Image: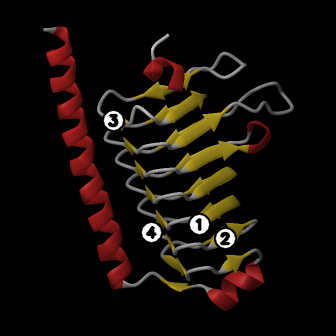
Amino acid sequence: MDLLRSLIRPNPNGDWPKIDSASYVDATAQIIGNVRIGPGVYIGPNAVIRADEINENGQVLPIEIGAECNIQDGVIVHALCGSTVAIGRRTSLSHGCIIHGPCIIGDGCFIGFRAAVFNAKLGDGIFVSTGAVVQGVDLAAKTHVPAIAAILSAEDAVRLVGATSAADCRFMKKIVSANLTLTKGYIRLAGQEQKEFAE
C-alpha cells in the first residue's frame, strides 16, 4: 500500500472517504472513514479529518466538507460517538484549529488559528478569531467571536460576541480566493508530476 492510499483509508466500520476529483488533498493529510469532500476543496499538510466512531445504532455519520472550503495545515476535524460534522461552502478552517462534532458550521465562515469549535451550530458568515473556544452554543449568522474568547453559554454569546465587520468579510473572501488558487495550482502540479513519473 503506497503512502497516499494509507493516509486516505476506511474506518473500522468499512466506510471509505469520498473526495471530489476537483479537490486537492496534500499527501500528508489523513482522511479516514465516512468523510465527504465537495469540489474545489483544499486540504493542507498534516490535516486530519476522521469519521470513525460509531453511534448507538452502530453507524458512523458523515463529516461533510462543502465546496470550495479550505482546511489548512494541522487542522483536526473529528466527531464524537458517530455524530455528524457539516461544514458549509467557502468556509476556511485555518492553521491548527479543531472542529469536533457534533457540529454544524455555515457557509462563508472563518475559524481562526488554534480556535476550537465543539458541540455547536454556527450560522453563515461567522468569524471566530485566533484561539477562541466555541462550545455548546448556537451562534447567529455574521457573528464575530473575539480572539481568545470562551463562548460556552448563551450568556457568553450575548456578552462577548459582536457583528462581523466589513474588514472581516474582506479578509474571509481573500482567504477563500487564495486557497482556490492554491487548489488549482496543486492539482495542475500533481498532474504534471504524474506525467513525469509515467514517462
Q: Amino acid at mark 1?
A: Ala
133 or 45: nearer the viewer? 45
Q: Disc 2, disc 4: CB below 8 Å? A: no
Q: Disc 1, disc 3: CB below 8 Å? A: no
x, y percentage for residue 143?
A: 53, 78
Furthest residue to the bottom?
Answer: 159
Which residue occupies 70% across, 43% down? 79
Label annotation for residue 133: 2
Residue matched to label 4: 125
Q: How many dots with numbers?
A: 4
Instruction: Choose top left, top right, bottom left or bottom right for residue 153.
Output: bottom right
Q: Earlier in the sequence, mark 2 or mark 1?
A: 1
Classed neighbour count for the residue bearing mark 4: other residues with Cα under 10 Å, few (<14), some (14–19), many (≥20): many
x, y percentage for residue 165?
A: 40, 84
Q: Secondary structure at mark 4?
A: loop
Q: Secondary structure at mark 1?
A: loop
Q: Nearer the viewer, mark 2 or mark 4?
A: 2
Q: Disc 2, disc 3: CB below 8 Å? A: no
Classed neighbour count for the residue bearing mark 3: other residues with Cα under 10 Å, few (<14), some (14–19), many (≥20): many
Q: State the quadrant of the C terminus.
A: top left
Label annotation for residue 147: none
